[in-house]
Image (cartoon, grey):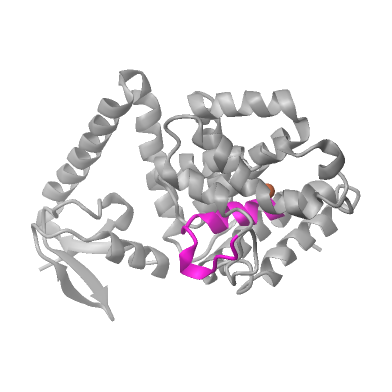
Amino acid sequence: MTYIKIPLSKINPDAMLPADIYLCLNEKYVKFKNLGESLGKEKYDNFMSKGIKFLYIDTKDEEKFLRWVDDKSAQEIEALVNQAGEANRDIITASKTMQETIYDVFSDQELDLEKVDRLQSNVEEFVDKMRSNEQYSKALSVLVGRSNSIASHSVAVGNLSVYIAMSLGFGHQFALENIYLASIFHDYGKLKIPEAVLSNKNHVDYLESMHSHPDSSVLIIRKSEGIPEQVIKMIQEHHEYWDGSGYPRGLAGDTLYKNSPILCLANELEEFLSSNQDMPEVDRYKAAVDLVQDGGAVKWPPSFYPRVIEALKLGFISQRGLED
Ligand SMILES: [Fe+2]
């Protein structure tokens, strides 16, 4: 029997497999799943995080397998078009391709400049598409009307959190949309804080206002319909740290919604970069990477390391030509 490689990114973890699937261990092929079984999300994520990029099938199953991949992909696109409307077909098809690219990039062990370039153009493409998202454009126009600095901070956090999410292997359009929406909304509650308090760290009301702004963001956002619960969670938890030392609730580890640390990190990085504009560029970006490195085990989950550090070093330093 001979075997051929199948990219993991082509396999839908929930779908029934059209052929037996093999793993290659120490140059030996071991049957892993039978025809008719599914891979399962957990196994899939496990392979992804170990950098396993390929599974194997019997060469004679190749044509059947490729037809299955095309059918599955077409079915998924149809299901999404049914939900979102025919007008969104192009966006949905493009995001499917993006999802596969991200999975491909992620399942390689090492990131390099070329991959980071690809990730960044995916971020741009994604953000561009978000302009047609109604919740996003409404939220942004409210922000721009009320506070330019919160608006530009939120947009920058959005770009950064999508970049971090993609570098961690998030390719699913809805997961990314939720992360982006949460970034745009996260500081809404600050619009309620008087400027005199917000701009003065020594003001008697400063700490209390800061501690309550995630919850007040949530209160405002709950008034608009159709905001997914995942978005609400991320907003509520955007100042919570992995070790429980954040605010307002001091939630720790797995009690946090799993994507909240992405927004928390993007928010801190953006805050650091924008409030240290007077530093030389090279020092500023290096210090930003250090901030993530030093926050490991305390502020952010172990799953961020070393991948996020790699992605930021490449995106912040190497791409800008800021190496020593
Ligand atoms: Fe905040």
Position of residue 273 measured from the top left corner of the image (x, y, whole percent) = 78, 50
Does residue 62 lie above or below 304 as drawn?
above
> Residue at point 28% right, 50% down?
10
Frontmost residue, 114 versus 122: 122
Does residue 31 lie above or below 315 as drawn?
below
Q: Name the quarter where the C terminus is drawn.
A: bottom right
Magenta span: 249-268
> Residue at point 74% right, 48% down?
209
Position of residue 252 measured from the top left corner of the image (x, y, whole percent) = 54, 68
Does residue 198 lie above or below 8 as drawn?
above
Majority secondary structure in the magenta region: helix
Frontmost residue, 155 versus 236: 236
Judge whether residue 59 is colored magenta: no
Q: Quadrant of residue 69?
A: top left
Position of residue 313 measured from the top left corner of the image (x, y, whole percent) = 67, 60
Frontmost residue, 201 versus 122: 201
Q: Quadrant of residue 312?
A: bottom right
- Determine the residue located farthest toward the front in the rendered image: 204
Tell me if 218 is positioned left or right of 100 in this view. right
Position of residue 143 measured from the top left corner of the image (x, y, whole percent) = 67, 29
